[in-house]
């Protein structure tokens, strides 16, 4: 009887998909390995320490290669591992062809790369060339005299011309990007810290040096490059004044300037076209037009960009799901026909996934971590999964500024002090959104320091490591970790999850995010409850549910096309 509401309670264990390897499904014509990649981001400093100095190292990554493979990911993005004085944890490189001594040696690197490739995992390196360290030999030469051959590797402004027009610095305690250097009576430019002088991309010699560095790594066999802060690399070297009120507008006035596209085309010609490497830029410019110009195939620049509008939705006091849905849908439709997206909600510059976008209270942490991982792994685009999020690791939330290690947090604190701002508010925000939240050591087991190190960890281990760790989750069939593995397997077995058209259902639903993915005959429906209360959704009649493929909880309530979701429930169905 149709008009009698019958609640069907189906007891289903998470991950009941049949993903037989033999069941190969057709790929679209424009298929590429980097579109199908599932990227696992490792912050090497925090992953696994093998020599007891409290800092993660390459040998630690080597030790954990089987674990990484077991996640079902197909590529690793490593944050910078080059020689560095670590003003910004490796984003201040002093030798682009050397390995940071804290992390190990080039021999370790070679072994790590072979180990990855043997396991079918590709390696993406971080290339930090908007700036170098001030301890790089180029900068030492450059600053030594005005006529040094390396002078033009950086941006200098002779003081006799007066003070240069204001530029904002993201990490400077005064917010000033020009630093006066008495040695040559000149200012140099640093968009980040004073120890991260900006390189002069207008100088062809510098550009060739960078391409040589990239070729060096490509020859070693790495599979891709992530270009750090690259949208800021090109500059108008006359350094004009910005309109009043816009001096700190980093996106509209600092990104995508000058000859940036020419440099990317040159980089493509010199490096990308010669190797089977993928390329992704941090930042996607000011708008979709910029983003398309960076990544459309016929432009011959990059493969994909890493846009921030989605991740930036979460503010310290939360976010609105309707806004979240609108942003991700808008980006998807802008790239539906051309170009390619990256999908991520966390990385080393953000707080933890579950604390920021989900709910890290004990009763919701597991469900909401799984739900968020379902989102990341079921959207169109290349998913980037940050180490520890496969366990549902949470924010550490330091109380005092002394506990923070991150230069952005420490110098930000000084800036607020200098400007007489509200320090308490700053600390409140830092507790929920600081980058150190996302950098605490990986929680491997319940032994001292979570099995990360036998020494003193460079950043404290979260005190919840006895409850949240790999060892415990390995043996629990329904853990966040094992659910993550089921999702990667599902994505790899079903090209629709990578390539399928995306279409949102009920954009205005305040707590449920539902969408379909369709690729020819392959059709899926993803239904995610982002709220901490039960919530239901009636599906359009055009959708006919076939099978439940994954469920992050143990039960599912459905009456025909009416689905009733538990808090943070995530379901994926095949549909007809
Ligand atoms: C972006 C990186 O992701 C961040 O960690 C770093 O501090 C800045 N670029 C400067 O390199």
Image (cartoon, rainbow, N blue to C red):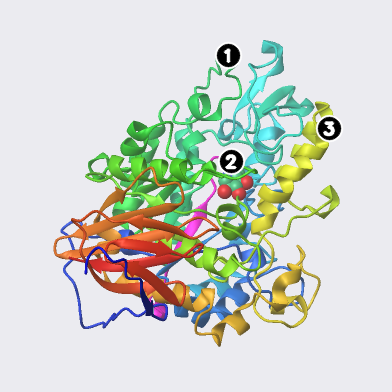
Q: Which residues are magenta?
A: 116-132
The residue positioned 26% from the left and 58% from the top of the image is: 517
Q: Residues within 10 Å of mark 3 (few under 14, many from 20)?
A: some
The residue positioned 76% from the left and 69% from the top of the image is: 463
Cβ of mark 2 under 8 A from ligand 1: yes
Gap in Å between the C-alphas at discs 2 and 1?
A: 22 Å
Q: Check disc 3 and report its element: helix, strand or loop.
A: helix
Q: Name the mark nearer the viewer: 2 or 3.
A: 3
Image height check: is 525 above or below 10?
above
Name the N-terminal-most of marks 3 and 1. Answer: 1
The residue positioned 72% from the left and 68% from the top of the image is: 55
The residue positioned 35% from the left and 63% from the top of the image is: 563
Residue at image mark 2: 131
Q: Is residue 232 left or right of residue 24?
A: right
Image quadrant for the N terminus?
bottom left
Residue at image mark 1: 241
Residue at image mark 3: 417
Q: Name the mark nearer the viewer: 2 or 1.
A: 1
Q: Position of residue 506 (x, y in %)?
A: 33, 47
Q: Is residue 445 left or right of residue 149?
A: right
Name the N-terminal-most of marks 2 and 1. Answer: 2
Q: Check disc 2 and report its element: helix, strand or loop.
A: loop
Q: Is residue 25 left or right of residue 35?
A: left
């Amino acid at each position: 009887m149709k008009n009698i509401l019958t609640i069907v309670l189906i007891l289903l264990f998470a991950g009941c998909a049949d993903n037989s390897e033999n069941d190969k499904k057709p790929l679209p014509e424009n298929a590429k390995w980097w579109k199908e990649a599932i990227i696992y981001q490792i912050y090497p400093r925090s992953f696994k320490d093998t020599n007891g100095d409290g800092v993660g190292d390459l040998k630690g990554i080597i030790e954990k290669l089987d674990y990484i493979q077991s996640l079902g990911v197909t590529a690793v993005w490593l944050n910078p591992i080059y020689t560095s004085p670590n003003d910004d944890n490796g984003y201040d490189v002093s030798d682009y062809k050397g390995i940071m001594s804290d992390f190990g040696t080039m021999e370790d690197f070679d072994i790590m790369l072979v180990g990855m490739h043997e396991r079918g995992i590709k390696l993406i390196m971080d290339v930090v060339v908007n700036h170098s360290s001030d301890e790089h030999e180029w900068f030492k030469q450059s600053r030594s005299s005005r006529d040094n051959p390396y002078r033009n590797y950086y941006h200098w402004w002779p003081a006799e011309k007066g003070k240069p027009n204001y530029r904002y610095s993201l990490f400077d305690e005064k917010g000033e990007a020009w630093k006066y250097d008495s040695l040559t009576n000149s200012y140099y430019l640093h968009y980040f810290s004073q120890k991260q002088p900006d390189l002069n991309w207008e100088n062809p010699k510098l550009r060739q040096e960078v391409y040589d560095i990239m070729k060096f790594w490509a020859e070693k066999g790495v599979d891709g490059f992530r270009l750090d802060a690259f949208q800021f690399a090109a500059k108008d070297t006359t350094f004009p004044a910005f309109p009043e009120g816009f001096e700190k507008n980093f996106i509209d006035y600092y990104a995508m300037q000058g000859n940036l596209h020419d440099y990317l085309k040159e980089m493509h010609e010199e490096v990308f076209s010669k190797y089977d490497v993928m390329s992704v830029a941090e930042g996607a410019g000011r708008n979709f037009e910029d983003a398309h110009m960076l990544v459309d195939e016929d432009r011959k620049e990059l493969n994909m960009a890493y846009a921030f509008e989605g991740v930036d939705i979460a503010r310290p006091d939360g976010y609105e799901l309707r806004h979240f849905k609108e942003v991700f849908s808008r980006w998807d439709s802008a790239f539906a026909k051309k170009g390619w997206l990256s999908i991520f909600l966390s990385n080393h510059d953000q707080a933890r996934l579950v604390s920021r976008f989900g709910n890290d209270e004990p009763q919701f942490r597991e469900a909401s971590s799984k739900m968020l991982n379902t989102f990341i792994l079921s959207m169109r685009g290349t998913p980037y999964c940050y180490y520890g999020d496969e366990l549902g690791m949470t924010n550490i939330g330091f109380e005092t500024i002394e506990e923070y290690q991150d230069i952005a947090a420490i110098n930000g604190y000084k800036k607020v002090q200098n400007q007489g701002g509200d320090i308490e508010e700053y600390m409140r925000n830092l507790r929920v959104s600081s980058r150190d939240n996302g950098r605490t050591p990986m929680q491997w087991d319940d032994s001292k320091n979570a099995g990360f190190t036998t020494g003193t960890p460079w950043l404290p281990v979260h005190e919840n490591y006895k409850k949240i760790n790999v060892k415990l989750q390995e043996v629990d069939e329904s853990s966040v970790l094992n659910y993550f593995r089921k999702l990667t397997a599902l994505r790899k077995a079903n090209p629709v999850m990578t390539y399928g058209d995306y279409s949102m259902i009920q954009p205005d639903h305040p707590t449920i995010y539902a969408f379909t993915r369709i690729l020819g005959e392959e059709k899926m429906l993803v239904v995610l409850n982002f709220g901490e209360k039960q919530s239901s959704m009636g599906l359009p009649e055009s959708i006919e549910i076939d099978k439940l493929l994954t469920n992050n909880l143990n039960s599912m309530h459905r009456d025909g096309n009416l689905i009733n979701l538990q808090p943070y429930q995530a379901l994926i169905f095949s549909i007809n």
